[in-house]
């Protein structure tokens, strides 16, 4: 099988940036609106929000704008670049999914050594969640047909 790449989802990256910017704007407006507020409480509220916004931009927004690859599938591995996870198909016992919620699916890999489950959320991956899951399953079964798909 050829290599299949999925890029970062620009939709969720924009959503996070807009929501965080709106919260920062609203908190700043409410603090400045009342002149009796002290500078220290304003900074305590605003600085962590700005730090989170910078982190979100660096982690999700800039890679999405740059059209970077979020998920790569090949005949031997799945590489999830968002959190630097690599899954070798030969180490996978089963694949399941959690489809609950509005924020995308979670693909769950049970490993042969039963040490842990590895979870890959599809929220920040561009594409249809069901298609991503089906493609992951196709690659897994092509590499190791005895992988159980739940």
Image (cartoon, grey):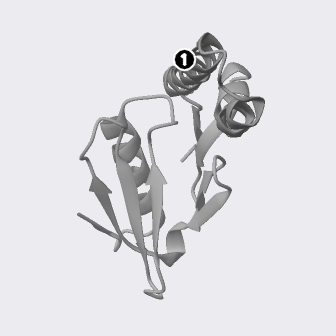
**In this view of the protein, which residue sits in the foreground, 111 or 142?**
111
Give the residue drawn at x 47%, y 79%.
116
Give the residue drawn at x 30%, y 56%.
97
Give the residue drawn at x 45%, y 38%.
123
Left or right: where does residue 136 sit relative to residue 17? left
Mark 1: secondary structure = helix
Mark 1 residue crowding within 10 angstroms, few (<14) / some (14–19) / many (20+): few
**In this view of the protein, which residue sits in the foreground, 29 or 91?**
29
Q: Hey, which quadrant is residue 112 in on the image?
A: bottom left
Left or right: where does residue 102 sit relative to residue 29? left
Quadrant into which the C terminus falls? bottom left
Location of residue 120 in the rendering, given as x and y in whole percent from the top left corner? 47, 54
Location of residue 7 in the rendering, given as x and y in whole percent from the top left corner? 60, 31
- Residue 3 in view of the camera: no
List the residue tagged with mark 1: 26
Location of residue 140 in the rendering, given as x and y in whole percent from the top left corner? 44, 60
Give the residue drawn at x 59%, y 60%.
77
Q: Hey, which quadrant is residue 25 in on the image?
A: top right
Location of residue 83 in the rendering, given as x and y in whole percent from the top left corner? 64, 53
Q: Is residue 138 above or below residue 44?
A: below
**In this view of the protein, which residue sits in the foreground, 80 or 61?**
61
Q: Hey, which quadrant is residue 26 in on the image?
A: top right
């Amino acid at each position: 099988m050829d290599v299949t790449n999925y890029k970062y989802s620009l939709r969720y990256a924009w959503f996070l940036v807009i929501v965080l910017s709106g919260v920062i704007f609203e908190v700043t407006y409410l603090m400045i609106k009342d002149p009796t507020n002290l500078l220290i409480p304003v900074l305590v509220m605003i600085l962590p929000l700005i730090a989170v916004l910078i982190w979100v931009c660096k982690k999700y927004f800039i890679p999405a704008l740059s059209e970077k690859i979020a998920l790569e599938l090949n005949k031997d591995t799945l590489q999830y670049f968002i959190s630097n996870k690599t899954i070798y198909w030969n180490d996978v016992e089963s694949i399941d999914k959690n489809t609950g919620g509005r924020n995308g699916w979670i693909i769950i890999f049970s490993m042969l050594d039963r040490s842990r489950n590895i979870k890959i959320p599809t929220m920040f991956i561009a594409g249809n969640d069901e298609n991503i899951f089906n493609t992951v399953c196709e690659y897994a079964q092509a590499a190791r047909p005895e992988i159980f798909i739940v």
